[in-house]
């Protein structure tokens, strides 16, 4: 953990809290920018905090939004930023808003959407059958259009819509080789249509079991084939996961049926990530006495699912110890069910 983050954590006077390291995030994004020579749109749904968006803004080409709410929010938070609007089930009002705001690209998910996009620049979202075995989440199902439906969409394309190419976000949580395997197939498939551009989506892995591991952007960039059209990606998790912490204190430590539990203020309604992904959230304990050995870290919710980390090695856990959960910068606060049990919301702190 960077000195500036430790200092911010040591200054916290109430828990739970979120701490975001904005200089660290900017540096991380700048490195990705330097190593990846194609367009990068940050997928705002990973973490749409306005400070995060503003820290990323100088280091990305634009932002991908997935709802009318995100569209308005990002439009306001980073005025003038280039935007792409995707996502299934867009309402007529959302499509009209995107047209009115002059969103640069709209990712069309179905033939129905075509009727609501006069004057728009669009990518057709493809649902392609490419192997995504290693994926944490395969984005097939209702997303985009299969080959038949894409051809129907192409044949029905109104004159007042500019078709720029295709979009394919086929999986999440992939390592370099797995991601390249899928994306090479996408690129090869798309080349037949001679598009102006192809958006390859996001899905770059992070490893919650190894907070120091990083997706290898250089090897990824090197593995992307040379193509006569523009390429764009939309990373979310791998962009923002590393620069947020959920910090809270221990209320109680107890043994029940041979197991040690540390009960922390707050819970997974503030940091849902370990529950949704089924991992132990990595953490650091700040304390100088108390239980060392193995423990299960839980929150205050009245459900056995409120577990941050299960039977993990710990040192110095006692009431009053502070626990900072790492890798809480993406799909953390904003995917959590904040109001379950009506605990106070965490305060947000920004290292600047
Ligand atoms: C969620 C999403 C992303 C970002 O995915 P990550 O796994 O966070 O990189 C990109 N594009 C689309 C269409 C998405 O739905």
Image (tube, grey):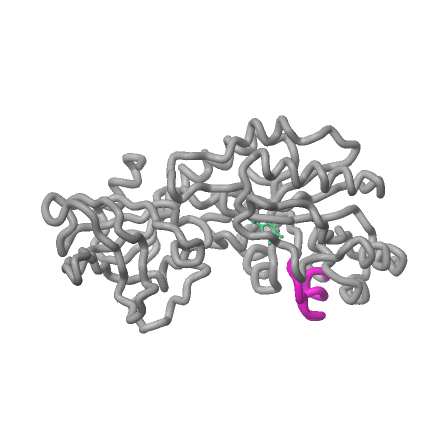
- Does residue 252 appear anywhere in the picture? no
Measured as percent of width and height from the top left, residue 123 is found at 75, 51
Q: Is residue 28 above or below residue 168?
A: above
**From this viewpoint, which residue is outermost toward the left?**
289
Residue 30 is situated, as x and y percent measured from the top left of the image, at 51, 33
Magenta part of the chain: 87-99
Up-down relation of residue 16 to residue 238 (above or below)? below
Q: Identify the residue at horizontal 77%, vertical 52% (top origin).
A: 121
Residue 184 vertical position relative to residue 66 in the rendered view, above or below: above
**Nearer-the-camera pick, 45 or 213:** 213
Which quadrant would the C terminus be assigned to in this image?
Answer: top left
| Residue 351, quarter of picture | top left
- Report which quarter residue 213 is drawn in: top left
Q: Is residue 10 magenta?
A: no
Q: How many marks?
A: 0
> Split into 4 quadrants, where in the image is the N terminus?
top left
| Camera sees residue 35 | yes
Give the camera-side residue of 74 and 65: 65
x 41%, y 38%: residue:
23
Farthest residue in the front direction? 257
Q: Quadrant of residue 157?
A: bottom right
Q: Which one is nearer the viewer's eye here, 301 or 54?
A: 301
Q: Is residue 123 left or right of residue 314?
A: right
Look at the magenta stretch and give its main secondary structure.
helix
Q: Position of residue 342 (x, y in %)?
A: 32, 73
Q: Is residue 272 left or right of residue 110?
A: left
């Amino acid at each position: 953990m960077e000195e500036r983050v430790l200092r911010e954590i040591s200054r916290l006077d109430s828990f739970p809290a979120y701490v975001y390291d904005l200089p660290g995030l900017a540096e991380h994004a700048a490195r990705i920018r330097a190593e990846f020579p194609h367009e990068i749109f940050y997928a705002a749904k990973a973490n749409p905090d306005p400070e995060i968006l503003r820290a990323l803004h100088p280091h990305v080409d634009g932002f991908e939004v997935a709802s009318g709410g995100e569209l308005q929010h990002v439009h306001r938070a980073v005025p003038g930023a280039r935007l792409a609007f995707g996502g299934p089930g867009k309402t007529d009002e959302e499509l009209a808003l995107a047209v009115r705001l002059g969103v640069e690209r709209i990712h069309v998910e179905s033939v129905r959407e075509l009727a609501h996009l006069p004057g728009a620049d669009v990518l057709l979202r493809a649902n392609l059958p490419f192997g995504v075995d290693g994926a944490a989440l395969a984005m097939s199902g209702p997303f985009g259009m299969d080959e038949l439906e894409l051809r129907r969409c192409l044949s029905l394309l109104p004159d007042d819509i500019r078709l720029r190419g295709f979009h394919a976000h086929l999986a999440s949580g992939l390592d370099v080789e797995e991601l390249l395997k899928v994306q090479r197939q996408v690129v090869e498939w798309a080349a037949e249509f001679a598009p102006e551009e192809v958006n390859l989506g996001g899905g770059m892995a992070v490893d919650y079991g190894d907070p120091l591991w990083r997706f290898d952007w250089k090897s990824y960039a090197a593995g992307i084939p040379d193509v006569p059209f523009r390429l764009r990606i939309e990373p979310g998790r791998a962009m923002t996961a590393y620069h947020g912490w959920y910090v809270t204190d221990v209320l109680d430590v107890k043994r029940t049926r041979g197991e040690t539990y540390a009960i922390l203020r707050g819970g997974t309604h503030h940091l849902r990530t370990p529950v949704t992904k089924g991992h132990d959230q990595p953490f650091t304990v700040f304390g100088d006495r108390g239980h060392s050995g193995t423990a299960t870290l839980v929150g205050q919710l009245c459900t056995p699912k409120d577990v941050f980390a299960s039977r993990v090695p710990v040192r110095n856990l006692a009431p009053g110890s502070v626990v900072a959960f790492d890798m809480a910068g993406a799909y953390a606060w904003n995917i959590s069910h904040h109001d379950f049990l009506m605990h106070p919301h965490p305060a947000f702190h920004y290292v600047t």
